[in-house]
Amino acid sequence: MRRGFVDRLLRMDEWSIGMVDRPISTFLTRPSLSDVEWLTVTAAERRAGPFAADPFGLPAKDRIEVLYEGFDRNRWAGRLERRAWSATGGWGRPVPILPAAHHRSYPYAFHADGAVWCTPEQASMRSVTLYRAPTAAGPWEPQATLISDFPALDPTITRWDGRWWLWCTDAERGPQTRLHLWWAPHVLGPWTAHGEGPVKVDVGSARPAGTPFVVDGRLFRPAQDSSTTYGGRVAICRIDEMDERRYRESVVALIEPDPAGPFPDGVHTLSAVGDRTLVDGKRRRWAPRTRLGHLARRESRRLASAAGRRPGR
């Protein structure tokens, strides 16, 4: 027990992103992550505390623009960045996208109606905002609020059977376990909550984890499996039934982290970009200075907040 406490106190999760040169559909029968081309960070980025997760890609001429969550250590919150990736040049330098006033992550991106769209996770704002850009490089402009007064985690959108569908979990009540579903006639809405409320409650396959895809006329979606640790592995779910009243899905594949690779401790995103697939990976890193500094700042904020609530202040 003492060893586990020390590990939690002095180690931190470090995430990175990578590219796999095969389609997402192959993970149904070949769930290995041994062939990932991982992002290599510079020495300066490593000293700053490297963190890259939740990758989503958009093709752009001779490259792929990869949107992902970076990490701001000063705010201890996620921010959105993009890097270009090409088969000949590998990974480019990071470029910030969207303002960093709030925590943002999971920049789910897709093509529709001749434009590119993005629904980043911003659960602290209790809304899902749809952004649009003329090209994968941006600029990104808000177009519509799809869901209001709901702390949606990892909102994931796809078009299926003549409707648009949106999955997410509830950041306040079951972030890893309670899957919610909305549907709409158009990507701009109006969006209607599924009649069943949470359509699934399962720590092993509820929270979205990447882009849905179709194989042989069947719809599949990646989901996080946090049954043993946060972001431990990815479950691929086959949608068996989905309409305005009913929803059923089955887990048909599990994607484990590569124990021999540089990120052996977790994976929680699997997203398609053409004939390639983006993933992320986790490792536990010894970082006592970073962890203790974060705990000290958190305690300072807690004390300041408590002082502000005292009578007469």
Image: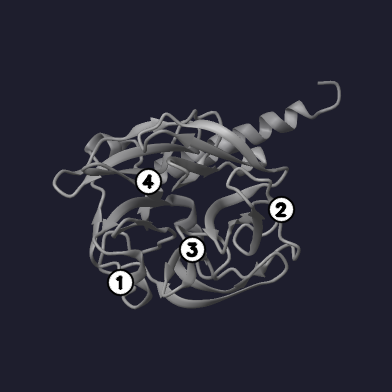
Determine the secondary structure under disc 4: loop
Residue 120, percent from left and from top: 52, 43
Residue type pointed to by label 1: Ser
- Rendered image: mark on residue 286: none
Q: Specify few, some or many for label 3: CA neighbours under 10 Å numbering under 14, 14-19, or 20 or more.
A: few
Residue type pointed to by label 3: Gly
Determine the secondary structure under disc 1: loop
Look at mark 3 in the image and give the residue it sits on: 4
| Tags 3 and 4 touching, CB below 8 Å | no
Look at mark 1 in the image and give the residue it sits on: 32
The earlier-in-sequence mark between 3 and 4 is 3
Residue type pointed to by label 4: Ala
The earlier-in-sequence mark between 1 and 3 is 3
Residue 66, percent from left and from top: 34, 44
Q: Is residue 15 above or below residue 142?
A: below
Determine the secondary structure under disc 3: helix
Look at mark 4 in the image and give the residue it sits on: 52
What separation in Å lies between label 2 and label 3 (alpha carbons)?
A: 44 Å
Residue at point 66%, 36% (across, down): 302
What separation in Å lies between label 1 and label 2 (alpha carbons)?
A: 37 Å
| Tags 2 and 3 touching, CB below 8 Å | no
- What is the quadrant of residue 303 in the picture? top right
